[in-house]
Image: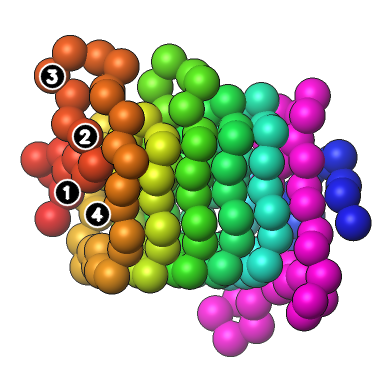
């Protein structure tokens, strides 16, 4: 079905007991963010898994998350006004198709933008295309580094021109990212 609401868990899970939101196999579950600021809101939540959803048309980022141990698995994240995924913290981002998050002034497929540390970020086996920049890791808050980072086996294509002079295309890594 199609749901015009925000997926926002009220509590966090734990390392051994993730809270899981998963589409039933074979069903298409659309979280349609028309007129909604956040479509998937995992801000301040830990150990939450979101799997198999179609996340679209948010007036902000499709998925916004901060915290530790969160997982985005096998989702379609597209046609959001801001970034497809806006995040900080430890996470596994795997098997997603992230595309066409482009109409805003500065939009990325995945934007890591500081605010919390990351010691274990995995971005693996995703498809990114037709966003502003596809993957941008920019921990802008002094002292917040990204360590133990894995970016592997992602497909990136149809990269748009950056909106600002001097920006990279495809993947950008800030100097503090290690």
**SS at mark 3?**
loop
C-alpha distance separating marks 4 and 3:
23 Å
Sequence-earlier tag: 4 or 2: 4
Image quadrant for the C terminus? bottom left
Query: What residue did someone put label 2 on?
Result: 169
**Front one among 160 and 73:** 160
| Image-based side of 44 in relation to 173, left or right | right
Q: Is residue 157 above or below residue 150?
A: above
**SS at mark 4?**
strand
Q: Position of residue 128 (x, y in %)?
A: 39, 50
C-alpha distance separating marks 4 and 2:
20 Å
Task: Indicate which label's residue lies in the foreground, 4 or 3.
Answer: 3
Q: Which residues are magenta?
A: 14-40
Q: Is residue 152 above or below residue 4?
A: below
Does residue 75 appear anywhere in the picture?
Answer: yes
Is mark 4 in CB contact (under 8 Å) with mark 1?
yes
Task: Indicate which label's residue lies in the foreground, 1 or 2.
Answer: 2
In reply to whether residue 159 is colored magenta, the answer given is no
Task: Indicate which label's residue lies in the foreground, 4 or 2.
Answer: 2
In reply to whether residue 18 is colored magenta, the answer given is yes
């Amino acid at each position: 079905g199609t749901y015009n609401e925000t997926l926002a868990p009220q509590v966090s899970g734990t390392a051994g007991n993730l809270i899981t939101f998963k589409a039933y196999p074979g069903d298409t579950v659309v979280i349609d963010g028309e007129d909604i600021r956040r479509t998937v809101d995992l801000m301040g939540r830990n150990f939450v898994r979101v799997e198999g959803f179609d996340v679209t048309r948010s007036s902000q980022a499709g998925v916004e998350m901060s915290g530790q141990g969160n997982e985005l698995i096998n989702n379609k994240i597209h046609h959001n006004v801001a970034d497809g995924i806006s995040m900080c913290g430890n996470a596994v981002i795997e098997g997603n198709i992230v595309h066409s998050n482009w109409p805003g002034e500065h939009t990325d497929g995945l934007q890591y933008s500081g605010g919390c540390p990351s010691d274990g970020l995995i971005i693996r086996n995703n498809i990114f295309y037709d966003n502003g920049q596809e993957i941008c890791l920019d921990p802008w808050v002094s002292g917040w580094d990204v360590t133990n980072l894995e970016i592997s086996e992602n497909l990136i294509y149809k990269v748009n021109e950056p909106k600002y002079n001097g920006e990279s295309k495809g993947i950008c890594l800030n100097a503090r990212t290690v």
